[in-house]
Amino acid sequence: MKTINLGNEKISRLLLTFSIPCIISMLINSIYNIVDQIFIGQGVGTIGNAATNVIFPLVIICNSIAGLIGNGCSAEVSLKLGEGKKDEAKKSIGSAVVLLFISSIIIMILGELFLPILVNLFGCSSNVFKSAIDYGRIILIGAPFMIIYSGISSIIRADGSPKYSMFCLLAGAIINLILDPIFILVFNMGVKGGALATIIGQLVSFIIAILYLKRIKSVKMTLKDYKLDKSVIKTLSLGLSSFITQMTILVLFVVMNNLMTQYGASSKFGSDIPLSVYGVISKINSIYVSCILGISIGSQPIIGYNYGAGNYKRVKETLRKVLSISLIIGIIFNLIIVFFSKEVVSIFITSSDSNYKLFMEFAVDFCHIFLVICFLNAFEMCTSIVVQSLGNVKKATLVSFTRQIILFTPLALIFSNIYGLYGALYAGPLADGICFFVVLFIFTSEYIKLGKLENKTDESELNLDTVKSNIKPACDVIITISREYGSGGRYVGKLLAESLNLKLYDKELINLATKESGLSKDYISKTEQKLTNSMQHNPYYNNDDKIFIAEAKVIKKIAKEPCVIIGRCADYILKDYKNKISIFLYTSDDNKVKRAIKYYNLESS
């Protein structure tokens, strides 16, 4: 597999690499439910749509568990890899996978036991109850598959394989898309057919996700690494924002379902139509949410790695680009939902349905009122995820709570009591507007903090350079170091340079030789890597004389001042220099092997 350099690659390219597969993955997750909703709407009608909406909170619970563990592990792994702590990253992955299995089984068992109670709690009407139970029983069987593959997908993205993560979800979605019309329309299985198609697709995604665990590339995992460790506490803390975000959406669903059922009963629409409409609109909105969360979650490895590595400038650049792209997508979606709401909603119901006119009337009103300024939600969702990536769990949690819990829920309850069914719709844009300004303050404070950290780092480097430039070398000498591979020549050279206040030249010689020869940096680097240790004493580079000539010129130029030079035949090139000291380092084979394993991440054979 190709390794992606999170610390040096262009931010725009990294965002494309990580976010596009992540967006597709999130969309596929939404498509599971949207496809069911479309075919159930076409084959069963309003009652079927309402039933899938009543069960959707169970899907949200599954996604919240997957996000708590998976996104938390993704953030933790990215931070630890950025800090160079691979052992801790390994523990995080092992603990997260085990916890995904345990939690998914518990959710399935509890869901099956308490499903009738949950269905009523989720706002089910009497007409929809049987269909909701039929659909929910089957969906819960697939809950472990859904939780585990969703959680592992986040880990796969953190491991630098976003395309594999996308393929994992895409394969299951295609299976679901093929089986839905067969089970619902051909075999006339109704809501049960839609649920069965869904869990078969989830099983396929689950298998593909599990297979990846043997190919994790950022760390070397073994079977004994998959056990619960205390590191899981940190993982859960970092995933808490994702969990709370999903749970606030759950609260939104439960509140809205109950308001639709309660106040719809006293309107011309009845209970079932508003319940069904909210289910359809929420699925449409999930496409928009998937895009924003996909961009934000896709940026997590980039933000986490560079923040852990102290590269705050790249973190700020990533935040700016993620926010800009998210707002553009939000505006486009907002325009579509306002001006083409009728065309979009009509996909979910047939014109022959007895409730068609009332359904379309309320659905269009819902779009024009509830979602009128929904583009502002992009800022809230984006901020919640990126602040989580910076390890600031408290602020990320506050962002997640702001719209759904602190603002929307009380406003919807108050307005519904005053204005009836439409009162809940009016609460939407009011909550969106207030939330935007709250989140703007939180995002700005985090961005300013990053700026201060960046300035502090720059000042430290500047002060260090100033101090070094004002201190004269301790001796007037040129030190050349040749060494066997794995003998620590680079480390010894660094110690000498620091102790004697001399300039150190190692990989910097490649850049200087590039300018001198006109050859590419990659070509010189790769050619040097092919040289054996014996060639360090050879006066000629048999493979490419041009590189030797260029490096010889560079070495003679830098040798006009005291310095330490690593390798590149400097001992031969400077053989006539009187103030030159040549050092050759070697050690036992056992020590070289141990050093190569510890510092160069090579595996013992």
Image: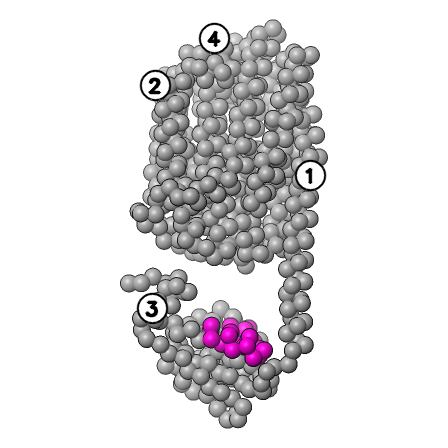
- What separation in Å lies between label 4 and label 2 (alpha carbons)? 26 Å
- Disc 1 packing (10 Å; few <14; some 14–19; many ≥20): some
> What secondary structure is the magenta-colored segment mainly?
helix
The residue located at (49%, 49%) in the rendering is 78
Q: Is residue 223 above or below residue 490?
A: above
Relative to residue 4, is residue 422 drawn left or right?
Answer: right
Query: Would residue 64 be seen by someone viewing this image from the given angle?
Result: yes
User: Taking 420 as reference, is 21 left or right?
Assistant: left
Under circle 2, the secondary element is: loop
Q: Quadrant of the N terminus?
A: bottom left
Q: Please say if the residues under marks 3 and 4 sit with CB atoms less than 8 Å apart.
A: no
Quarter of the view holding residue 384:
top right
Label 2, on which residue? 187
Q: Which residue is mark 1?
A: 440
Q: Is residue 509 left or right of residue 330?
A: left
The mark lying in front, picked from 2 and 3, is 3
Q: Which residues are magenta?
A: 490-512
Query: Residue 253, how many percent across, how many down?
Result: 54, 22
Q: How far is mark 3 from mark 4, CA to CA?
A: 72 Å
Q: Which residue is mark 3?
A: 593
Location of the C terminus by quadrant is bottom left
Q: Earlier in the sequence, mark 4 or mark 2?
A: 4
Closer to the chain start, of discs 3 and 4, is 4
The x and y percentages for residue 242 are 52, 36
Q: Secondary structure at mark 1?
A: helix
